Image (spheres, grey):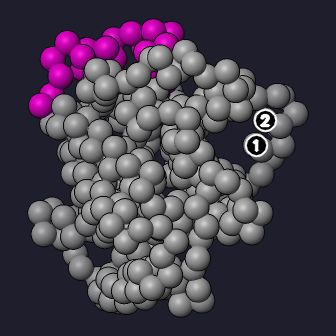
Amino acid sequence: MPLGGCRSPEHEDRGFTRGRWFSHRPQLFSKAVFMMSSHTRGLLMICITILLWGVLAIALKYSLKFISVCTIIWFRFAFSCLFLVGYYLVRNPGSFAILKRPPILGIVAGLALCGNYYGFTVALDLTTPSNVQILIQLSPLLVAVIGITYFKEELTRLQILGFFIAALGFVLFYWDQIQHLVISKDSYLKGNLWVMFSALSWAVYAVCQKILVRTWTPLQTNLLIYVVASVVFLPAARFDELAGISDGTVWAVLLFMGANTLVAYAALSESLRLLPANEVSAMIVLNPLITLAIAAELTRRNVSWMPAENMTLLGYVGALALLLGVGCVVKKH
């Protein structure tokens, strides 16, 4: 998932970000990490986030061969929700106050994130991980536009250049994809519409979070958001699918996806504490490169559950241009 120019959901929860993520790591690893400079540790954390987000689309594509869209999404939200409930029961039970009188904006953010997860996952089911990961980068552009128009943020020359480069990259990438389809054109176009819906939903979520963190800690708002999302997808979740899973690999991938958001955002929070936010934002848009590399290798190996990635040089140039443009927009200066 993209950073979208928004502060990390866990950025301001000091009990979670000041090194406690490492408190249960092996002592030798912990010592090695803290012997690094702050900048090096920050780079390590952001690399962990980039890697996890880059692999996530591939894991989702694999799991969709065995489990329905809504069941996967419910499992991911329920996993995150249970973790945060356990965390607050131990660390700060008073934080459950947000559930007693939930802010309307928090509920809106939860519904928006539901739309983001659903659109992203359906798009993956209809198209390919590389296509979805590249096009979802529209979300930080939308967040930037909202910031400029609604929050009256300054539009810099670098951002103007970034919008131009991103638009050019989008055209090149889209043209290459439409000319070398390995799936039906109808599925591709429907998938792209779902990606755009997902990007718009993420932008709404990011703006809501930006306002909510003025009053609540990011982990508190996440708790409310995960509760809302878990309830929304509960009626559509098929527990018979989960009960029928006998393959340990499928369960391993499910658990990985459940933990992915928590670990990735924990690492992201630590990187934001150690590095400038614009540097982190510019680096995080590189995560689709991980997806592109893995997808290309799986295509080369003719993996049955992965649709062939038929990108040409023009497509790769377009993808890189789009990522470069997004990086310029979120970096600002």
Q: What element does badge 1 sit on?
A: helix
Marks 2 and 1, how far apart at CA: 6 Å
Measuring 45% from the left and 61% from the top, which residue is drawn there?
Answer: 127
Tell me, yes or no, if residue 242 can be seen here: yes
Depth check, front residue: 301 or 12: 301
Q: Nearer the viewer, mark 2 or mark 1?
A: 2
Q: Is residue 127 left or right of residue 317?
A: left
Q: Residues within 10 Å of mark 1 (few under 14, many from 20)?
A: few
Residue 34: assigned label = 1
Q: What element does badge 2 sit on?
A: helix
Q: Identify the amino acid type marked 1.
A: Phe
Residues in magenta? 78-104
Measuring 84% from the left and 43% from the top, which residue is drawn there?
Answer: 32
Depth check, front residue: 237 or 272: 237
Depth check, front residue: 262 or 134: 134
Give the mark count: 2
Magenta span contains residue 85: yes
Picture quadrant of residue 165: bottom left
Picture quadrant of residue 94: top left
Q: Position of residue 57 (x, y in %)?
A: 54, 52
Q: Identify the amino acid type marked 2.
A: Ser
**Depicted 299 relative to depicted 170: above or below:** above
Measuring 41% from the left and 22% from the top, which residue is drawn there?
Answer: 238
Q: Residues within 10 Å of mark 2 (few under 14, many from 20)?
A: some
Q: Position of residue 61 (x, y in %)?
A: 55, 49
Measuring 39% from the left and 9% from the top, which residue is drawn there?
Answer: 93
Residue 285: assigned label = none
Q: Position of residue 28 (x, y in %)?
A: 87, 33
**Depicted 258 relative to depicted 32: above or below:** above
Magenta span main SS: helix
Mark 2 lies on residue: 30
